[in-house]
Amino acid sequence: MSKASFEEVMSSVRRLTEEVKGQSLEVMEKFYRETSVKYKALLDELHMEYTHPHHGTLKATYAEFDRYISGSNRRRGGNFICRKRFGH
């Protein structure tokens, strides 16, 4: 998503893994919060475009698309559980 090559990503993963190895919980929580902020900013920056032959074109950020998909899956899952409870 950041247009980095696979090798660059794996190098970053190894470097970050070494940085946090043996760190205290407080340091890990700080690292997680900082990384989370960066990831959310990235999702807000990246845009996607999906064209459906009948419904037109959807233009959204990855964050918007993720919220839509997550929300629709929760509604469907809740509806399924409700039906199972009432024997439908």
Image: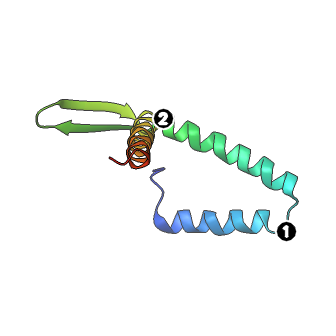
Q: In this view, does 55 lie above or below 19?
A: above
For residue 30, which numbered disc appears in the image? none
Examine the image and state in which quarter residue 51 appears.
top left
Percent coordinates x, y for residue 23 in the rendering: 85, 63
Q: Which amino acid is tagged 2?
A: Glu
Would you call the spot at circle 2 few (<14 residues within 10 Å), some (14-19), or many (20 or more)?
few
> Which-is-in-front pick, marks 1 and 2?
1
What residue appears at the point 36 percent right and 48 percent down from the top-left corner? 87
Residue located at (60% from left, 68% from top)? 11
- Name the residue type under label 1: Gly
From this viewpoint, which residue is outermost toward the front? 87
Q: Name the residue under label 2.
A: 45
> SS for tag 2?
helix
Residue 85 percent coordinates (x, y): 44, 47
- Compared across the picture, whether 24 is left or right of 69 comes to right
Per the image, the residue denoted by label 1 is 22
Q: What count of labels does the image hold?
A: 2
